[in-house]
Each structure stands twice: as structure tokens, then as C-alpha cells.
Image (spheres, helix red, strand yellow):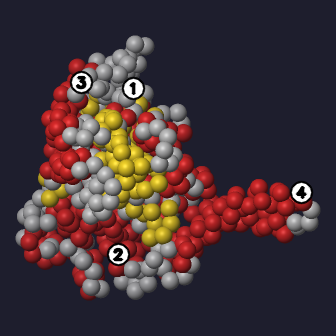
Amino acid sequence: MNLISGIKLYIEKMCSESGPGMKIILLDKETTSIISMAFSQSDMLQREVYLFERLDSGRSNERLKYLKCIVFIRPTKQNIQLLANELRNPKYSAYYIYFSNIIPRTDIKYLAECDESESVREVKELYADYLCVNPNLFSLGIPNCMANLNWLPDALNRSMQGITAVLLSLKLNPVIRYRAGSQAAQLLAKLIYEQITKDSSLFDFRSNMDGAAPPLLLVLDRRDDPVTPLLHQWTYQAMVHELLHIKNNRLDLSNCPNVPKDFKELVLSGDQDDFYGNNMYANYGEIGSTIKQLMEEFQRKANDHKKVESIADMKNFIESYPQFKKMSGTVQKHLCVIGELSALSNKRNLFEVSELEQEIACKAEHSAQLQRIKKLIADERVSIDDALKLVALYALRYERHANCDTSGLLQIIKTRGGRAAIVPSLIEYAGTHVRQGDLFNMVRITDAVKLTRNLIKGLKGVENVFTQHTPLLKETLEDVFKGRELDPLFPAINSELVPFRRPPQEVVVFIIGGATYEEALAVHQLNNAGYKVILGGTTIHNSQSFIQEVMAATSGIQFKHTKSMIKYCSTDNI
């Protein structure tokens, strides 16, 4: 279950089926991102694809009849119309058309009618309709999927199509479970089930001959766990996203004055950069020592290159030079990134802030934490955004506490000029009235399993104060793989597939409202332990993008659960 390999196979198929010769590829906005996250431009050049053009941008009318054209687009109404216009007046010798998802037969018929010159050689569906971030992580690139706490219709439809494509590319026909009580999760699960039923012939994969349980698609809601996206992260990939913001595996450092001109935009792909691939889940301390070792190895090779005395030395130098040059680029690139992370961590006093964030997320010590929060958020060295996150975590944890003082903390935020309205919005979005599951380990005495788990956790102590939090998703997945009863909390929509008592072997998880790199790390650890899990989300959040999504989702609704904070609410929520 490797998403990047799946997308690569599809792209290889497109390039090989069009045969030898020079080719151009026509893409739309989304398929451009889909291809660029799996293949570099040089990889495409090796497959004789020399030109990349967008179907939806103004293009010249020059006829290039010596080129074959690969078309890879999403089957949207707009794209079908643009392609129809292209086929009525073809510029290239032959067209090989690939759609990234299921296309209605009526659209195929319409395109065939437009192809009067009979230049189309191939029309196929290749199910590459999602952004593969890591081998076990995909995104659909939808930054805001809700308005008035309900699905935006386009986002709902796009999510259904994206998940369907993931299931088809992995050849899975799963049991679909969704988070009970979440209308968004239920609606999406229902749509996916309807799509699978409608195109049942596509989902006719091997039946479970050996009695193994069918795979599982688990549709979750971000509103169950608002804590994970708010926490500062200390593993490499997650930390880069939190502090510098990764978009489609690209990192924009153009606003960082100390970065050399050649490193203003970087590609961070584990598939195209071995150092990043091997270290994306390493913590901040380990990365420092690993890059030091890489640096020493680089210096050793640089010294070897200075000793060019004989013909044999020259030959070795020429052969090893491309790798040497690549290594030099890798070292410089990651030194730039680590340098920026280090500078930001010190400037924003993140070690102290992060330690307190983790304490609030993992321990119930109200009065001690309240005093520390007051002290930190009044400190000018702590940025207003970090101060707001501390107050947000406090408000989520102690919402029902007898001495909860969220209003007092918001007053300090307001005095510092911060957006105090964020906190009431967050409580409306994911307060105690919404959440299911056990976010803060508020364990009932009757739940013996969880009580024991927490007791063991307490006895073991904490290896690292900055990474003591584990996302709710990890506990949910552990329950799935241990074969615990899922039914009241995660009902199945196609229950005829459920009479298996064995736990599923393969699980695809989709989080409405966005996944995080901390959850991707939890999935990576489970996969290393021998399980098979794929994680996806409407987007991949850091704390800033999550807060923006919360504000967009709650904009204009009337707040019912934050009466005590009414003077800090936005005017359109009162």
C-alpha cells in the first residue's frame, strides 16, 4: 500500500502507451500538482515528455504535428468542454487521453463526436485523483471544507471522488465506517457507498477467499481532535510545515533574508531526496547530529576530489562528480532549512512554549498551568500566535472546569492586540458538546482497558517532554487492529460486509477538516509494526491553516456554547 508507487505506475503507463517519440503533456491545475508530487521534471524528460502545458490557460494556436499529446485531466465539466474545443481543432498528431477518475459515458460520447479528425488514439481512466504527500499520506488540497459547520458542496464532492480514486488505485472494496454523531462524516460515507454501488464492476476485486476480513475505510472528523493541529511539532517534516509551511511538497523561503538565492524555493519530497526520506520522522535533536555526519562525509569526499593526480583519478572524479554535486546540494539545502528552524525556535522561545502546550494536552493540573500560561502570554518574547494557541488549548481542556478562567486569559490576549475571537470559534467548532472519544483521557472508572492503559503510561514516565502527546487517531487505530468493538462509535454503512470478527488487514483513514503530520507519524509507526494503514485528509494542517479553517467553518453562525466569552466573539456570531 504505497501511494507514490501507485501514482508513478499510472504516469509510467501514460508515457509508455503513447509509444516512442517527442510528446507534450496537457494538464489542468490539479493534475499538474498530482504529477509534480510524484515525478520531477527530469524524470518526465527521460520519458520523452518535453513540453508541459495547461489545458485551462491561454495557449498559442501553433500546430505542432510532429508531437504526440498526452492529456491528463480531472473529468470536470469545464475540462471536458476545453478538451472538446481542442479536439475540434487539433494541434498535435495524436491524442492519448487519461482521466484521473470515473468519467460519465455521456461525456465520452460527446468527446467522440467532437473528434472529427479521428486524432484520439486512447481514452482511459487512471485513478490518480489525489496528492500523494508521503507513501502513506494523501491530501485533496481543500483548505476549507465547511461553511456554517456544514459541508461545502464542492468540497464534499471532491472528497468523495478523491477517496474513491484512492480505493481504486489500491484495489480495495472496503467496509465503510464513519464517526457516529458527525453529520459530515455520515454524509461523505453515504456518498462513497453510493458511488461504489453504482460502479460495482470497477470494485470487483479479489474476494476474501482465505477468510480474511475485508479492508476498512474509516471516515473521521477533525472536530473530535482539535488539539493535535494546535501543538508545536518537533519531528522534521512536521516542524518544517508548522514553522515554514510546506505546500504540495514545496517550501517557499523567499521571505527568509539569510537564505541564498538558489535555495529560495525547495522541493521536499522523500521520494526525490534520500536524506529527507530517511529523516522526515526524526526529531529535531537527531536531525542536527545526522546533518553533522552528512557534512563530515561531504568534506571527506571534497578532500578526495582535490587529489586528482593520475588519469585514473581524473576518470574517478568525472564518474563521481554528479553524485558529489547532488550531495553538495542536499547538504546546503538541509542546512538552510535547519538554520531557519533553529532561528525561529530561539526567537519565539518555542522550547518553553511547547513544553507547556504538551503539559496542557497530557496532564490535568489546572491551577499550576493557569499561572504558567498567564506568565507566558504576557511575555513579549512569546509571539501573539503562540500565546493564542496556549489559551486555545487551555479553553479546550478546562471548558467544563469549575474555576475555568478563559475570559481572563482572553483579556490579556486582547490587551496585546491578538484575535481573541479565535478561541470562542474553536469551542463552537470542537468543544465538549461536539467531541466523541476520549481526547483528554477523562477516563470513567468503568472503562478498565483505558484505565490500565493510562496507568501504564503514567508509570513508564515520559521519554521526551516535547513529544509526550499522542493523537487520538493512534488509539482509534490500535482499537481497530486489536479487534475491539467499533459499532456504537463507528457504525458501518455497508453492514452486509461486517460479520467478520477478525480485525481488518488494511485500513484507509480519511479526516474531514484535514490531517496533520503528527498523525502521519503515528501511521508510519503502525506501518513499521507490520500493519497497513493509509491516512488522508481534505488538507494537511499546521496550526495557522487549522485556525483559518475553524474561522471559515464558524463564520456567520450563532454561538450557543460560549456565552461566557460573548464580548470576545466576532460580531457576526452574536
Answer with mark 2 or mark 3, whichever residue precedes in sequence.
Answer: 3
- Of badges 1 and 3, the one in the foreground is 3
Quick one: SS at disc 2? helix
| Nearer to us in this view, 215 or 427 | 215
Q: Amino acid at mark 3?
A: Ser
Q: Is residue 162 visible?
A: yes
Residue behind mark 4: 312
Q: Is residue 87 left or right of residue 304?
A: left
Nearer to the camera, 395 or 7: 7
Secondary structure under the numbered disc 1 in the rendered image: loop
Tell me if label 1 and label 3 are in contact, CB under 8 Å. Answer: no
Mark 3 lies on a secondary structure that is loop
Location of residue 94 in the rendering, given as x and y in whole percent from the top left corner: 35, 42
Q: Is residue 21 above or below residue 407?
A: above
Q: Point out the frontmost of discs 3 and 4.
A: 4
Residue at 43% in and 56% down: 51
- Rendering coords of residue 344 (x, y %): 49, 76
View extreme (right): residue = 310
- Whether residue 424 sits left or right of residue 31 in the image: it is left
Q: In the picture, residue 303 is in which quadrant?
A: bottom right
What amino acid is at disc 1? Answer: Pro
Q: Which mark is residue 190?
A: none
Q: What residue is shown with label 2?
A: 385
Neighbourhood count class around disc 1 (C-alpha, 10 Å): few under 14, some 14–19, many 20 upward: some
- Which quadrant does the C terminus fall into? bottom left
Q: What amino acid does circle 2 point to?
A: Asp
Provide the secondary structure element on which disc 4 rests: helix
Mark 3–mark 4 distance (CA, rounded to whole Å) = 63 Å
Residue position for label 3: 200
